Amino acid sequence: KSHQVLQLLDDLLSRCQPLMVIVSTILTQFRTWLWVKSAIVSGVKKDGELAQLCNISNPRRVYYLRQEVANTSINALAKAVTMILDLEMSIKRGADGRDLLVVILGVCRLFQVV
């Protein structure tokens, strides 16, 4: 699916989407997945409790988030969040968008099915 990710990224950049908006959106999604996975691993079972703990305004969304993280390693999610945070900091310090591609491909590699 790396090809699909790169195509989507290319589409966003060709539409002049600001780099920080793209990175912030990706970071928000990965943080949410990390919070949900962490709560599940910690033993939280009720959707309402999970939604409150993870600041998810719609408790019905938890059902889908559970499915999205079901076969995902918490370590891979943590590494992805760290990589994206590092990218965000480098962009804030003035780096151009070249690092975005490297980080996105690195994140894709974390979740490849072997």
Image (cartoon, grey):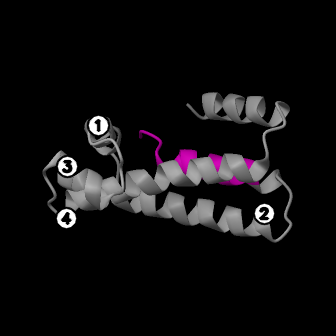
Name the mark nearer the viewer: 2 or 3. 3
Q: What residue is shown with label 3?
A: 48
Q: Secondary structure at mark 2?
A: helix
Q: CA distance from mark 2 to mark 3?
A: 36 Å
Image position of 28 with respect to 1: above or below:
below
Q: Which mark is residue 91?
A: 2
Disc 4 marks which residue? 42
**Could you tell me the amino acid type at mark 3?**
Gly
Q: Amino acid at mark 2?
A: Ile
Residue pictured at 77% horizontal, 49% vertical:
19
Sequence order check, earlier mark of 2 and 1: 1
Q: Earlier in the sequence, mark 3 or mark 1?
A: 3
Mark 2 to mark 1: distance in Å? Answer: 32 Å
Q: Tell me where residue 108 appears, x and y as whole percent.
A: 56, 45
Q: Earlier in the sequence, mark 2 or mark 4?
A: 4
Q: How would you rate the neighbour count of disc 1 (Cα within 10 Å): few for under 14, some for 14-19, many for 20 or more?
A: few
- Crowd class of label 2 (few under 14; some 14 to 19; many from 20; radius 10 Å): some
Q: What span is in magenta? A: 100-114
SS of the residue at dot 1? helix
Name the amino acid type tagged 1: Gln
Q: Earlier in the sequence, mark 1 or mark 4?
A: 4
Give the residue at mark 1: 67
Does the magenta segment cover residue 105?
A: yes
Camera-side residue of 107 and 57: 57
Earlier in the chain: of badge 2 and badge 3, it is 3
Q: Reply yes or no: does residue 80 show up in magenta.
A: no
